[in-house]
């Protein structure tokens, strides 16, 4: 057994979707790799991927991991087949690593059968929902152009009846009323909400700025933060706010959108191809590809699949040069990797949402009463404490040989 990076895994079990959301990074941002892949993951790909994960854990000593079922839409998989995959994961990794199963779904196909599977295998479920019916239905449509809110609402009712916590993933709809969206979502009883910045690059952001102004994401989120802060609903976990607050107080980011930490997760596609971050599809056709497949490669082989994937997944990317003089260079640290891309300088750019992030950080700092200098002092203290602990561990560790 050797030390190694702790990885988490995303199985893209369906390369097709029953919806056609206009902003989707898989189908509507210019990448066409999904067309080359089987619609549903083969059983042998799942079997091989589980074995690769088992070997990785045995070699590295990793004792906990998450496996997320993703797509496309994972509920396009037949329920009996999906159950067999969950059972195989639990049985074959038992005694090797503790596994948390997760699923991200658009919610439109959920029924009592799915609820029973989710409960039986303790699956943590995320539901994609973007706000009020009119906001949601303006962009989250089926292939006939019909809105999907009513079907999502029925899916939520299924989960509620089964006592399954509701966890929402909501893409910011630029120009919408953030407070109105948030109040509607909270009325549905979620345990958490993850607001996502829309996926644009420096090559595609121009028209957005022309239409919505310099800080549309911050303008959407700050009224939500104020509601969350004033109404005493801090027990509702809003990931972006929790992570900005944690960073401001000197901690390390726990989401990939902030902090410039190594991603530490890998994607497996329906044909077994391994990717480092599927959202890189917004950058250019094939950007997420590593050239590796679980049929022939271990997950750690991604380290040798090119300097970019090694840095993004394992080592951490270089902070963009344009962030070096920024007051949030050690907290935001450049923003989400796909949002840094331009065809001229690749990923050596601050996020296209840089102005939004700065405005949001400033607002959270004001509410917490924490200056940039105090954050730096806190981070230095935490790093010093971590270094002392590591040195103490090395001093106390038994020697061999």
Image (cartoon, rainbow, N blue to C red):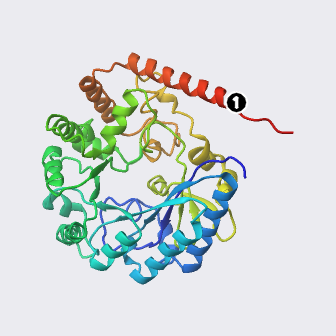
Residue, x 79% and y 35% (percent of image)? 399
Quadrant in the rendering for residue 226: top left
Q: Secondary structure at mark 1?
A: helix
Mark 1 = which residue? 396
Quadrant in the rendering for residue 146: bottom left
Q: Nearer the viewer, residue 301 or 136?
A: 301
Q: Is residue 236 above or below residue 190?
A: above
Q: Residue furthest right?
A: 401
Residue, x 30% and y 25% (percent of image)? 365
Direction from residue 136 to residue 69 in the image, left or right: right
Could you tell me residue 110's position as x and y percent? 28, 74
Residue, x 51% and y 33% (percent of image)? 320
Could you tell me residue 305's position as x and y percent? 67, 54
Q: How many marks?
A: 1
Q: Is residue 348 above or below residue 267?
A: above
Q: Is residue 341 above or below residue 92?
A: above
Q: Nearer the viewer, residue 324 or 276?
A: 276
Query: Quick one: quadrant of the C terminus?
Result: top right
Could you tell me residue 394's position as x and y percent? 70, 31
Q: Is residue 189 visible?
A: yes
Q: Is residue 293 visible?
A: no
Residue, x 35% and y 61% (percent of image)? 24
Q: Please tell me how crowded label 1 is: few (under 14), some (14-19), or many (20+) other residues with Cα within 10 Å.
A: few
Q: Nearer the viewer, residue 86 or 400?
A: 400
Could you tell me residue 251's position as x and y percent? 44, 31
Direction from residue 59 to residue 334 in the image, left or right: left
Direction from residue 236 to residue 30 in the image, left or right: right
Direction from residue 17 to residue 170 in the image, left or right: left
């Amino acid at each position: 057994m050797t030390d190694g990076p702790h990885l988490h895994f995303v199985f893209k079990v369906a390369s097709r979707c029953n919806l056609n959301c206009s902003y989707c990074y898989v189908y509507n941002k210019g990448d066409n790799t999904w067309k080359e892949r089987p619609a549903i993951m083969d059983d042998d790909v799942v079997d091989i991927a589980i074995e690769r994960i088992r070997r990785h854990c045995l070699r590295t000593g990793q004792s906990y991991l998450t496996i997320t079922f993703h797509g496309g839409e994972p509920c396009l998989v037949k329920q009996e087949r999906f159950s067999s995959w969950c059972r195989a994961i639990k049985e074959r990794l038992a005694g090797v690593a503790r596994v948390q199963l997760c699923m991200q779904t658009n919610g439109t196909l959920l029924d009592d059968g799915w609820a029973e599977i989710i409960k039986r295998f303790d699956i943590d479920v995320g539901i994609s929902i973007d706000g009020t019916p009119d906001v949601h239905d303006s962009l989250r449509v089926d292939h006939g152009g019909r809105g999907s809110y009513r079907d999502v609402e029925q899916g939520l009712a299924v989960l509620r009846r089964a006592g399954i916590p509701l966890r929402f993933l909501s893409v910011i709809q630029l120009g919408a009323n953030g407070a109105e969206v948030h109040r509607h979502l909270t009325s549905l009883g979620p345990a958490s909400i993850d607001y996502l910045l829309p996926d644009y690059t420096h090559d595609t952001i121009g028209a957005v700025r022309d239409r919505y102004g310099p800080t549309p994401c911050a303008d959407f989120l700050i009224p939500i933060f104020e509601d969350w802060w004033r109404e005493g609903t801090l027990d509702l976990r809003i990931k972006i706010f929790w992570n900005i607050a944690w960073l401001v107080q000197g901690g390390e980011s726990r989401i990939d959108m902030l902090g410039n930490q190594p991603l530490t997760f890998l994607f497996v596609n329906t044909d077994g191809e391994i990717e480092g971050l599927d959202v890189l599809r917004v950058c250019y056709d094939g950007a997420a590809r590593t050239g590796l497949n679980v049929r022939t490669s271990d997950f750690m082989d991604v380290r040798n699949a090119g300097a970019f994937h090694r840095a993004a997944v394992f080592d951490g990317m270089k902070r963009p040069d344009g962030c070096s003089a920024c007051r949030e260079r050690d907290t935001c640290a450049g923003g989400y990797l796909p949002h840094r891309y331009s065809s001229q300088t690749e990923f050596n750019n601050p996020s296209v949402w840089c102005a939004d992030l700065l405005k949001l950080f400033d607002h959270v700092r004001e509410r917490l009463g924490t200056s940039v200098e105090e954050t730096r002092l806190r981070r230095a203290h935490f790093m010093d404490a971590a270094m002392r602990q590591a040195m103490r561990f090395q001093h106390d560790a038994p020697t061999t040989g």
